[in-house]
Image (spheres, rainbow, N blue to C red):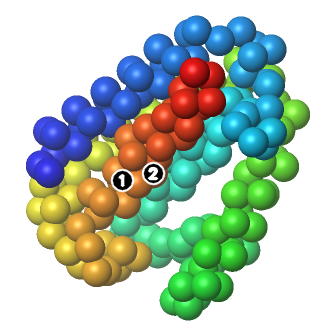
């Protein structure tokens, strides 16, 4: 995937999510999701937080600053099971931090996160996106995979779950 395709997929997934959100009332956005868990609003806050994290990692790298993944207090250890537990704790923290915010606030934060991630990706040279090992914090794979995982793949995974539950 080249830079143009990456930005295109990011834009398309954003449009898909925005179209879905436009069909919902504020009350529907707060209804429990599939299985009685996170609502659309909660899920949008989750997606937003991960987009902000990805944008921050990229910006820090571009500015020559050290990157802590995932964030201070939730650092990766290199042990797969421990790292999954850390990610789950971080997701719980994101939920608790955002659960009382109104849907309009979450939507605005989502839009800002989309703009921030898109802007930083747009400034990157293609080699940094496509060549494995160009980011010290993502050493074994090309960073576009991290960007996809925190943007359009992430959006589409959650969007599909909500669309399936409403059928």
Give the vertical position of 2 relative to 113 (above or below): below
- Spot occupied by residue 72 in the image (x, y as percentages of width and height): 67, 72
Q: Residue furthest right?
A: 100
- Report whether 104 appears left or right of 3: right
Q: Residue furthest front?
A: 167
Taking depth in this image into account, of 93 and 126 the one nearest to the observer is: 93
The image quadrant that residue 70 belongs to is: bottom right
Q: Is residue 83 visible?
A: yes
- Report whether 128 appears left or right of 32: left
- Mark 2 crowd level (few <14, some 14–19, many ≥20, 10 Å Cα): many
Q: Which residue is mark 1?
A: 147
Taking depth in this image into account, of 40 and 132 the one nearest to the observer is: 40
- Spot occupied by residue 104 in the image (x, y as percentages of width and height): 71, 18
Query: What residue lies at 15% left-to-right and 69% top-to-bottom?
Result: 131
Q: Is residue 109 visible?
A: no
Taking depth in this image into account, of 122 and 23 the one nearest to the observer is: 23
Taking depth in this image into account, of 30 and 94 the one nearest to the observer is: 30
Labelled disc at residue 150: 2
For marks 2 and 1, give the CA distance: 5 Å
- Mark 1 crowd level (few <14, some 14–19, many ≥20, 10 Å Cα): many
Mark 2 and mark 1 residues within 8 Å of each other at the beta carbon: yes
Query: What residue lies at 26% left-to-right and 73% top-to-bottom?
Result: 141
Query: What residue lies at 45% left-to-right and 51% top-to-bottom?
Result: 150
Labelled disc at residue 121: none
Give the vertical position of 138 relative to 163 (above or below): below
- Spot occupied by residue 58 in the image (x, y as percentages of width and height): 38, 58
């Amino acid at each position: 995937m080249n830079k143009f395709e990456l930005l295109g997929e990011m834009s398309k997934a954003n449009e898909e999510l925005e179209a879905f959100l436009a069909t919902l009332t504020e009350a529907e956005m707060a209804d429990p999701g599939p299985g009685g868990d996170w609502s659309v609003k909660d899920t949008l806050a989750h997606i937003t937080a991960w987009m902000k994290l990805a944008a921050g990692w990229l910006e820090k790298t571009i500015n020559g600053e050290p990157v802590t993944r995932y964030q201070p207090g939730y650092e990766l250890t290199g042990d797969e099971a421990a790292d999954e537990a850390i990610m789950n704790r971080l997701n719980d923290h994101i939920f608790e931090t955002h659960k009382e915010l109104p849907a309009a606030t979450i939507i605005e934060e989502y839009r800002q996160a989309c703009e921030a991630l898109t802007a930083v990706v747009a400034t990157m040279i293609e080699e940094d996106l496509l060549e494995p090992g160009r980011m010290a914090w993502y050493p074994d794979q090309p960073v576009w995979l991290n960007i996809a995982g925190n943007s359009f793949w992430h959006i589409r995974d959650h969007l599909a779950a909500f669309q399936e539950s409403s059928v």
